Image (spheres, grey):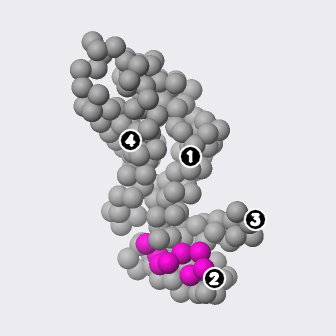
Amino acid sequence: MDRRIKKTQEAIYSVFIDLLKEKGFNKLSISDISERADINRGTFYFHFSDKYDLYEKCMDFYVGKLLISCSNDTEIKLNPNGFLQIFKYLKENYDIYRTLLYADGLSIFHKKFHNAIEGQLKKAINKMPEEIILSQEIASEFIINGFTGVVEWWINNSMPYSPEIMTEKLNGIFSPYTKYLV
C-alpha cells in the first residue's frame, strides 16, 4: 500500500476513534470525520464507502495491530507469553480498545477478536488428547468465548488487575488447553 494512502487511512481511523468517544456511532457523520481529519468528502469516499465500511476497516486495522504487536505475526498466540503481551498492549491502548468494544453496542470488535483467535486455536485442538477434549467444537467455543469474555470484562471494568495477574490467572484456567497451542 502506498505510504500516503496508509497515512491518510490511519489519520481517519484516529479521528474516527476520537469521534466515537465524543458522539457515538449513530450521531457521527461523514462530514464530522472529514472536517476533523482535514480531508474532503471525496477523499473519505476514496477510502471508504460509508461510515459502516470505515467502522469495519477500523476494526480490522486495530485487531491487526493488536495481533502484530503481541506476536509479531497476524496470528494470536494463546500461550503464557501471548497472554501477557495481549494484556500489556491493551493496557497501553486502553482508550482505543474500550471505545471500539463499546461503541453504541456494536459487536463488530467482539466478532473480529473472536475470529482472530479461532484459527490458531483450531490448529491446537487437533493436537489435544481425547481425554482433554471430547468435542472439538465445544472445547473451541469454550476457550474462545472464555478468553474473549475475560478480555472484554477486563476492559469494561477499567483493568482491575495488572497484565501479569491476568496472565497468571488465565494460564491457570486454560493450562490444560494452552499447552497444546503453538
Q: Which residue is mark 2?
A: 43
Give the secondary structure at mark 3. helix
Q: Which residue is mark 3?
A: 3
Q: Is residue 143 left or right of residue 16?
A: left
Q: Which residue is mark 4?
A: 148
Q: Which residues are magenta?
A: 45-52
- Indicate the position of residue 154 as horizontal and vertical percent values: 41, 42
Mark closer to the observer (4, 3): 3
Q: Residue at x 43, y 52 (%)?
A: 112
Give the secondary structure at mark 1. helix
Which label's residue is closer to the chain start, 2 or 1?
2
Spatial CA span between label 2 and label 3:
15 Å
Query: Which quadrant holds the N terminus?
Result: bottom right
Q: Residue at x 32, y 39 (%)?
A: 145
**77 and 150: which one is in front?**
77
Q: Which mark is residue 66?
A: 1
